[in-house]
Amino acid sequence: MSRGHCTFKQRDVTAAVKAVTAAGVDVARVEVDKTGRIVIIAGKPGESMSGEGSSWDKAIADLEAR
């Protein structure tokens, strides 16, 4: 079974991250969806967007604690 058509290339992600970094913005996370859309989340790596996290973060933490 084949993996299908590749919707993005590594160089696309690298170029996007370099452009954001050159603009003086820290990159916390990069997301690429099935369609190839690249989303760059600004912030310090590993930094939570809010102090407590989202309800999904809490739900996942509860599942991992079991």
Image (spheres, rainbow, N blue to C red):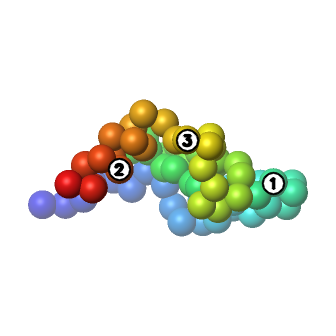
User: What's the distance in space between the residues labelled 1 and 2, CA to CA?
Assistant: 29 Å
Q: Circle 1 — which element? A: loop
Most foreground residue, 19 or 63 = 63
Most foreground residue, 60 or 42 = 60
Which residue is drawn at the image coordinates 60% and 49% (left, top)? 48
Identify the residue under disc 3.
52
The answer to whether 34 appears left or right of 21 in the picture is left
Identify the residue under disc 2.
61
Which residue is drawn at the image coordinates 30% and 47% (left, top)? 62
Q: Circle 2 — which element? A: helix
Disc 1 residue type (three-letter): Val
- Nearest-to-viewer mark from 1 and 2: 2
Q: Circle 3 — which element? A: loop
Residue 2, position as x, y percentages in the image: 19, 60
Q: Are marks 3 and 1 in contact (CB under 8 Å)?
A: no
Disc 2 residue type (three-letter): Ala
Q: Earlier in the sequence, mark 2 or mark 3?
A: 3
User: What's the distance in space between the residues labelled 3 and 1, CA to CA?
Assistant: 23 Å
